[in-house]
């Protein structure tokens, strides 16, 4: 087990901390030892993955554990539907495994995760613990795919749980924002490998809002990006195909031009120009939306879901009821126009099916996720303030890994499973070994 005491910051650069140590254990026993030693001395412990959370969920002035040496697939158990036909497998994965590595490993086994977000650098445990989701009107987020997990608790003991074993711990730990313990491995339900046919094209916000529910159902995984200060959106519809479908991926040259040069290099330059001269932003957004021309391609699911993200930003995302989403987007557009605030970053609009995970933003209701972003060199404060007011007025719930101002008092009335989660936390970690600034704000 290696360790260091260097300072840490998250991917976005808005969270910094100075842990007393940063151990990288290679076994579950080593994780348990780190927790036991820290707890006995009154030192707090947090686990960090890729640091892609925009909140200080992983920040600590105590011990910061990395699971980068606990990676890979441990076991696979095929599953069958009610007719006895194999419908996938329950795959046990070490918690530090990055999603961009897990996708190819599963594909080689003829399997895939049912859905993914649009950023693949996250660790599996980090993505699940903060409620990462993708888009899909009939598909739920990553925590809902978890069928079992192993967690090191505050006294250094190792607990294995599922719906049948320690069901309350399982229900809480599927989305636990790191407040219950250190997850060392997870068993996730995977489906047979599938390809995605992606159709991307420009459209208008006005047209999308005319029937937002219809848009959500127009493909297995539908989403769009709206460029503020314009009526332009860029649509992405992904349709599932069998895993043995004929793949027609984006050509290497076009991939370099679209996904690397235009979406990262040129876009980064445009954002820096907007930061220097904010008045240019509407024109830059019109240019950016026009530069993203239509394209259709077919590739492995994990390759289509995620895109490279190298331009840094701040993000706030709320899940609102699907029926309220068109009104929310209209209100957000009007508020941006009235405020004089400018942003070169698009607003991302995605969808997810209801689930039964206690802290999930989609708990017992289908939702539309609306995410506002701001370039990291531009002030986000006022923009996020009025956006959050609009989201809250529609009954929105904040994403646990993205910026928001809610406190435990607010969340207790917004999140139906909140009290159940807190009860499990009080039992597992009464001394708040896994607490930090963030949990002090969002949990009692």
Image (cartoon, grey):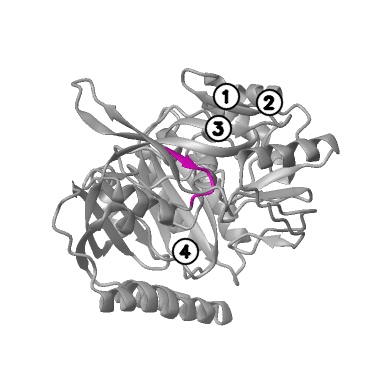
**Numbered mark located on residue 337 in the image:** 4
**Which residue corresponds to mark 2?**
428
Q: Are marks 1 and 3 in contact (CB under 8 Å)?
A: no
Task: Give the image quarter of residue 418.
Answer: top right
Q: Percent position (x, y) of residue 290?
A: 30, 75
Whichever of callouts 4 and 1 sits on the residue coming sooner in the sequence is: 1
Q: Nearer the viewer, mark 3 or mark 4?
A: 3
**Which residue corresponds to mark 1?**
169
Measured Cα–Cα span from mark 2 to mark 1: 9 Å
**Which residue corresponds to mark 3?**
150
Q: Nearer the viewer, mark 2 or mark 4?
A: 2
Whichever of callouts 3 and 4 sits on the residue coming sooner in the sequence is: 3
Task: Give the image quarter of residue 426.
Answer: top right
Q: Nearer the viewer, mark 2 or mark 3?
A: 3
Measured Cα–Cα span from mark 3 to mark 4: 49 Å
Whichever of callouts 2 and 4 sits on the residue coming sooner in the sequence is: 4
| Residue at x 47%, y 63% (from the top left corner) | 337
Measured Cα–Cα span from mark 1 to mark 3: 10 Å
């Amino acid at each position: 087990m290696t360790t260091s005491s260097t300072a840490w910051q998250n991917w976005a650069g808005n969270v910094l901390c100075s842990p007393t140590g940063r151990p990288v254990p290679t076994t579950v026993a080593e994780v348990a030892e780190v927790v036991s030693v820290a707890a006995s001395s009154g030192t707090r412990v947090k686990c960090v993955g890729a640091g892609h959370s925009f909140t200080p969920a992983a920040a600590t002035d105590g011990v910061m554990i990395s699971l980068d040496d606990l990676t890979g697939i441990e076991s696979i158990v095929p599953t069958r539907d009610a007719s006895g036909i194999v419908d996938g497998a329950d795959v046990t994965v070490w918690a530090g495994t990055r999603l961009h590595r897990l996708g190819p490993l599963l594909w080689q086994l003829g399997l895939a995760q049912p859905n993914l977000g649009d950023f693949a650098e996250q660790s599996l445990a980090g993505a699940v613990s903060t409620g990462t989701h993708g888009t899909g009107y009939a598909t739920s987020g990553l925590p809902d795919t978890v069928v079992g997990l192993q967690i090191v608790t505050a006294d250094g003991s190792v607990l294995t749980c599922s719906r049948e074993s320690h069901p309350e711990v399982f229900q809480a730990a599927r989305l636990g924002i790191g407040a219950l313990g250190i997850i060392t491995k997870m068993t996730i339900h995977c489906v047979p490998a599938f390809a995605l046919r992606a159709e991307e094209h420009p459209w208008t916000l006005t047209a999308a809002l005319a029937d937002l529910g219809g848009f959500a159902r127009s493909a297995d995984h539908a989403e769009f990006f709206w460029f503020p200060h314009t009526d332009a959106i860029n649509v992405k519809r992904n349709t599932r195909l069998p895993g043995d479908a004929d793949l027609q991926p984006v050509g290497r040259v076009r991939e370099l031009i679209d996904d690397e040069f235009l979406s990262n290099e040129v876009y980064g330059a445009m954002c820096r120009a907007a930061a220097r001269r904010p008045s240019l932003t509407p024109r830059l957004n019109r240019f950016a939306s026009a530069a993203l021309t239509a394209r259709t391609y077919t590739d492995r699911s994990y390759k289509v879901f995620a895109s490279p993200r190298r331009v840094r930003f701040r993000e706030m995302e709320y899940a609102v009821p699907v029926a309220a989403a068109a009104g929310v987007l209209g209100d957000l557009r009007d508020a941006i126009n009235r405020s004089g605030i400018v942003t070169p970053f698009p607003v991302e609009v995605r969808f997810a099916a209801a689930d039964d995970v206690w802290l999930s933003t989609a708990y017992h209701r289908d939702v539309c996720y609306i995410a506002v972003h701001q370039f990291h060199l531009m002030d986000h404060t006022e923009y996020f303030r009025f956006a959050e007011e609009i989201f809250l007025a529609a009954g929105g719930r904040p994403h646990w890994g993205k910026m928001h101002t809610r406190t435990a008092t607010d969340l207790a009335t917004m999140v139906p499973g909140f009290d159940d989660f807190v009860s499990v936390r009080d039992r597992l970690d009464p001394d708040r070994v896994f607490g930090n600034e963030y949990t002090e704000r969002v949990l009692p």
